Amino acid sequence: MSKKLKLVAVSGSLSSPSRTTVLLNAIVAELQRKLPLEVHLIELQKLGPLLGGSLSRLELPQAAIKDILKIEEADLLVVATPVYRASFTGLFKHLFDFVGHESLTNIPVLLAATGGSERHALVIDHQLRPLFSFFQALTLPLGVYGSEADFETLDLGGYAIASEALHERIALAVERALPYLAVSSQTIASAAKARA
């Protein structure tokens, strides 16, 4: 039995319900269909109040430290953010300001974003990719962007993906990611065997 990859999924949305979190969960579900994963979800809407008043990692409450350690120990990250003023949210950046700058070296990161229209789609390449390049993470080749038109509002509140094209983009992004993730999975299995 292959060892599960530790996947940490980060939603940069500050609202609930959230199209961004719906997109993030859809990407994670597609990855789970292809790989054995142990998933940890971080929602900034819940974590944000613990981060906002802290200027250094030493000031963070234990619950926030726990999530940051999960990020630093991840085998794979999936990060999604809504677009605010042509970039990711300030709290999203604040969260990653607390992450050790060498902890994500060579860690695969699948990037995703949501926005009001297709005009914001380049946020993935112009904002998210440079952030994770700083960490020397392995940003996966294909990101996933969803506009407001790709979602429907449910009767009881919340959102669902309504666009077949967005479902196809998610499937393609995961398919393109798999060769990189297979290498990660083999590395983890080898390390576990060496420790045994």
Image (cartoon, rainbow, N blue to C red):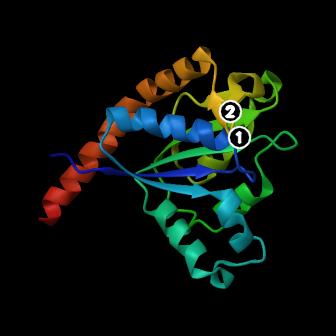
- Give the residue at x 82% y 24%: 119
Q: Residue 35 placed where, x, y %?
A: 32, 38
Q: Is residue 188 visible?
A: yes
Residue 128 visible here: no
- Residue that appears at 47% across and 64% down: 70
Give the residue pinned by disc 1: 157
Q: Which mark is residue 154?
A: 2
Q: Residue at x 65, y 65 (%)?
A: 47
Quadrant of the image occupied by residue 95: bottom right
Residue 101 pos. (x, y %): 58, 63
Spatial CA distance of label 1 from label 2 is 5 Å
Instruction: Tell me which corner region of the image, top left, top right, bottom left or bottom right, holds residue 177.
Output: top left
Dots 1, 2 in contact, CB < 8 A: yes
Name, please, the residue furthest toward the bottom. 58
Amino acid of disc 2: Leu
Name the residue type under label 1.
Gly
Q: Position of residue 91 (x, y in %)?
A: 75, 60
- Near-viewer residue (72 or 46): 46
Which residue in the rendered view is the most extreme toward the front? 156
**Residue closer to the observer: 171 or 153:** 153
Secondary structure of residue under mark 2: loop
Left or right of 43, for residue 138: left
Query: Considering the numbered disc 1 on the image, is that residue within a helix, a strand or a loop?
Result: loop
- Pinpoint residue 18: horizontal percent, then vertical percent: 70, 44
